[in-house]
C-alpha cells in the first residue's frame, strides 16, 4: 500500500522533463503485463472452444445417450458408443485412488511428523524424482515388470485393469504426498500440543486431531490425484490391454478414454469417427472441469 | 495402557511400511531400468542417426527434444514472468485476479491428451502449421505456463517489501524498481520454474505425439516434424521393436530427469538461503 502511494507521488511530480514519456511507457508495460496474465484465460477459452466445436456436433449426431452409455464401437458402421471407455476410466482411477491414497497419506504423515531429519533428506528427493519420471517410463516399466508379474501370478497375459491401476497408483503418489505434507504442516501447533497435553499419544494425535484438521488439504490432494489418474494416457496404453469392453474382472483388458483418443487418432479418417474422438475429449474435459471446480471450492474455503 | 501402546506400534509400523513402499517403488524403477539400459548406451547410440546394420542411433530424437525445449521456453517464459509480475506487483485483489488464478489452476489440470487434441485442430490444422516443432512448442508452452507463473509468483512474493519501498523512495519508478531490484532477487525462483518446465517437456508424450508427429528424421527447421525421446520410447515399447533400445532410451530419460532435479534442488536451496 505504502509503495503505491510513494509511486504515485513520484509520477505526479510535474517538473521532470522525461516524466510524461516515462509515464506512458510505464502504462504500456503494465498493459503488456496484464495481457500476459490474461493468456491463461485466453488459453482455457480457446482450448474449450476448439474441443467443443469439433466434439459437440459429433455428440449431437450420435446422440448424447447413445454416445456415453452404449458400449458398441464400430467406426466403419458409425456406431460409436464410449460407455466401455468411460467405465474403464472410472475403474482405473478409483482403483489407483484406493491404493495410492493410503500409501501416499501415510508417507506424508511420516514426512510431516515421524521422520528424523536425515530420513527426510532421503525421502523428499525420492518423492520429487517420482514426480519427475516421465509417464512413458512408468508405462515401459509397467510393461516389462508389472505385466509379467501379474501374468505369472494370475495368468491371462497380465495387461489389463490391474496393471493400469498399479502403475497409476505409483504415478499419483507424489501428488498425494506433497499436498498432504503441506496440509499437515499447516495444522496449528496448539492443536497438537493440546492433544498431547491431554494425554493422547503421538499416533492418536495424528489420527484424531491432525488429519481431521488437515482434511480439506488432503481432500484437495485426492482431487488432484484423481485428475492426474484420469488424464494419464501413454503409461496406460502400454499396460491396459486396450480392448473395448466393460471389465468384469480386475484382470480384464480395458481401454480408458485417454487411451482411446490416442490410439484411434493415429488412424481415424476425418469425419464422424475423428470427431467422435474430440467428443471423447469433451467428456474427459467435463470430468476435469468438475474436478477443478470442486478443487477451487475446497481451496477457497480453506482461505476463509 | 499397554494395549494402546501396541496399537500405536502397529500403526507406526504401517506408516513406516508405506514410506518404504514409496521409496521402494522409485528405487525399483530406477535400478531396474538403468541397470538394463546403461550397457546399451554407447557414444554411437547417442551421436548417430544410423549405426551399422539396421541399428539406429537416437541423435534425431535428441535434436527434436532440444528444439522443442528451446522454442517452448522462449515462448512460455516471458509470458509466464510478465503474468506473475502483474499478479504480484500490479493486480489488486478482486474478481479479475480470481478469474486469472482459476484459469491458471485449470490449465495445470487439463490432461495432456486434451492439449494434444487442441493443438491438433488449432495449430496443426486450423493455422496450418502441420505436424511441426512450431505446433508442438506452441501447445507445450500453454501446458508449462502455469508452472512458470506459479514459481515466479512465489519468488516475487519472497522479495521483501523493504526492497520495493527503498527503491521507490529513492525516486525510481515502479517499472525500474521491478527491473533493477525485484527481478534480480527473484531469478533463482524463475529459473526453478524454467527447469521444472524443461522436465515436463522432456517427459511429455501424449500432447507432443499429436502435434509434433512421429517422423524419424532430423528436424531442420521450425516447420519440420520430429520425434522426441519420450515419443521414441513409446514407439519402441508399443510396437515391441527393440527392448534393448527401449531400456537405453528410458535410461537416458531418467538421467536427464536426475540432472534436472539436481539443478532444481540446488536453485531452491540457494533461494531458501537468500530468504533467510
Image: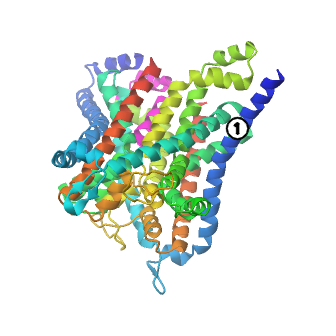
In the rendered image, the residue lying farthest to the right is B2
Q: Is residue B106 magenta?
A: no
Disc 1 target residue: B14
Is A183 situated above or below B218? above
Is B242 situated above or below A83? below
In the picture provided, is A131 more to the left or to the right than A77? right
Look at 48% across and 57% down and name the residue there: A160
Look at 70% across and 38% down and name the residue there: B14
Location of residue B66 (image quadrant): bottom left
Is A286 situated above or below A85? above
Look at 38% across and 66% down and name the residue there: B227
Q: Position of residue A52 (x, y in %)?
A: 22, 44
Please tell me whether the stretch drawn in magenta is mainly helix, strand or loop: helix
On-image quarter of the N terminus of chain B:
top right
Q: Which chain does tag 1 point to?
A: B
**Could one spot residue B158 in this view of the protein?**
no
In the rendered image, the residue lying farthest to the front is A248
Q: Is residue B153 magenta?
A: yes
Location of residue B128 (image quadrant): bottom left
In the picture provided, is A64 more to the left or to the right than B199? left
Q: Bounds of the magenta span?
A: B146-174
- Judging from the image, the colouring scheme is rainbow
In the picture provided, is A237 more to the left or to the right than A143? left
Q: Position of residue B63 (x, y in %)?
A: 41, 67
Count of labels shown? Answer: 1
Q: Position of residue B167 (x, y in %)?
A: 44, 26
Location of residue A269 (image quadrant): bottom left
Amino acid at each position: 500500500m505504502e509503495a503505491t502511494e510513494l509511486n504515485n507521488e513520484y509520477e505526479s511530480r510535474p517538473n521532470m522533463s522525461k516524466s510524461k514519456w516515462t509515464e506512458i511507457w510505464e502504462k504500456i508495460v503494465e498493459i503488456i503485463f496484464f495481457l500476459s496474465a490474461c493468456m491463461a484465460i485466453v488459453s482455457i477459452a480457446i482450448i474449450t472452444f476448439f474441443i467443443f466445436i469439433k466434439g459437440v456436433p459429433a455428440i449431437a449426431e450420435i446422440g448424447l445417450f447413445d454416445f456415453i452409455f452404449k458400449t458398441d464401437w464400430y467406426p466403419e458402421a458409425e456406431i460409436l458408443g464410449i460407455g466401455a471407455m468411460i467405465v474403464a476410466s472410472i475403474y482405473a482411477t478409483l482403483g489407483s485412488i484406493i491404493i495410492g491414497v493410503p500409501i501416499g497419506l501415510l508417507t506424508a504423515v511420516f514426512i510431516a511428523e515421524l521422520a528424523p531429519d536425515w530420513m527426510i533428506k532421503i525421502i523428499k528427493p525420492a518423492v520429487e524424482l517420482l514426480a519427475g519420471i516421465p509417464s512413458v517410463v512408468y508405462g515401459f516399466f509397467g510393461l516389462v515388470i508389472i505385466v509379467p508379474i501379474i501374468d505369472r501370478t494370475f495368468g491371462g497375459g497380465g495387461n489389463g485393469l490391474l496393471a493400469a491401476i498399479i502403475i497409476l497408483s505409483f504415478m499419483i503418489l507424489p501428488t498425494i504426498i506433497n499436498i498432504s505434507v503441506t496440509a499437515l504442516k499447516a495444522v496449528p501447533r496448539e492443536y497438537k500440543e493440546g492433544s498431547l497435553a491431554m494425554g493422547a499419544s503421538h499416533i492418536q494425535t495424528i489420527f484424531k486431531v491432525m488429519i481431521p484438521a488437515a482434511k480439506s488439504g488432503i481432500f484437495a490432494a485426492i482431487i488432484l490425484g484423481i485428475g492426474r489418474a484420469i488424464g494419464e494416457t501413454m503409461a496406460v496404453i502400454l499396460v491396459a490391454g486396450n480392448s473395448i469392453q466393460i471389465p468384469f474382472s480386475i484382470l480384464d483388458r480395458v481401454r480408458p478414454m485417454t487411451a482411446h483418443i490416442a490410439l484411434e487418432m493415429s488412424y481415424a479418417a476425418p469425419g464422424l469417427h475423428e470427431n467422435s474422438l474430440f467428443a471423447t475429449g469433451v467428456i474427459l474435459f467435463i470430468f476435469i472441469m468438475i474436478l477443478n471446480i470442486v478443487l477451487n471450492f475446497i481451496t477457497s474455503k480453506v482461505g476463509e | 495402557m499397554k494395549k494402546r501402546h501396541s496399537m500405536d506400534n502397529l500403526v507406526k509400523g504401517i506408516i513406516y511400511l508405506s514410506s518404504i513402499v514409496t521409496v521402494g517403488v522409485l528405487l525399483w524403477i530406477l535400478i531396474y531400468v538403468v541397470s538394463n539400459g546403461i550397457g546399451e548406451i554407447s557414444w554411437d547410440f547417442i551421436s548417430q542417426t544410423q549405426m551399422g546394420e539396421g541399428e539406429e542411433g537416437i541423435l534425431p530424437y535428441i535434436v527434436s527434444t532440444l528444439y522443442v525445449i528451446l522454442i517452448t521456453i522462449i515462448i512460455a517464459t516471458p509470458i509466464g514472468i510478465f503474468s506473475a509480475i502483474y499478479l504480484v506487483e500490479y493486480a489488486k485483489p478482486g474478481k479479475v485476479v480470481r478469474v486469472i488464478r482459476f484459469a491458471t489452476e485449470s490449465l495445470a489440470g487439463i490432461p495432456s491428451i486434451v492439449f494434444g487434441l487442441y493443438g491438433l485442430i488449432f495449430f496443426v490444422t486450423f493455422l496450418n502449421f502441420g505436424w511441426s516443432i512450431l505446433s508442438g512448442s506452441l501447445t507445450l508452452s500453454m501446458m508449462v505456463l502455469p508452472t512458470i507463473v506459479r514459481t515466479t509468483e512465489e519468488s516475487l512474493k519472497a522479495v521483501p517489501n523493504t526492497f520495493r519501498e527503498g527503491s521507490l523512495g529513492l525516486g525510481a519508478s515502479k517499472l525500474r524498481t521491478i527491473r533493477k531490484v525485484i527481478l534480480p532477487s527473484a531469478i533463482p525462483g524463475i529459473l526453478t520454474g524454467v527447469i521444472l518446465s524443461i522436465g515436463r517437456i522432456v517427459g511429455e508424450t501424449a500432447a507432443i505425439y499429436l502435434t509434433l508427429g512421429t517422423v524419424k528424421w532430423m528436424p531442420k527447421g521450425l516447420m519440420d516434424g520430429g520425434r522426441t525421446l519420450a515419443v521414441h520410447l513409446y514407439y519402441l515399447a508399443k510396437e515391441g521393436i527393440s527392448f534393448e533400445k527401449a531400456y537405453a532410451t528410458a535410461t537416458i530419460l531418467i538421467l536427464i530427469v536426475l540432472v534436472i532435479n539436481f539443478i532444481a534442488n540446488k536453485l531452491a536451496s540457494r533461494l531458501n538461503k537468500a530468504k533467510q
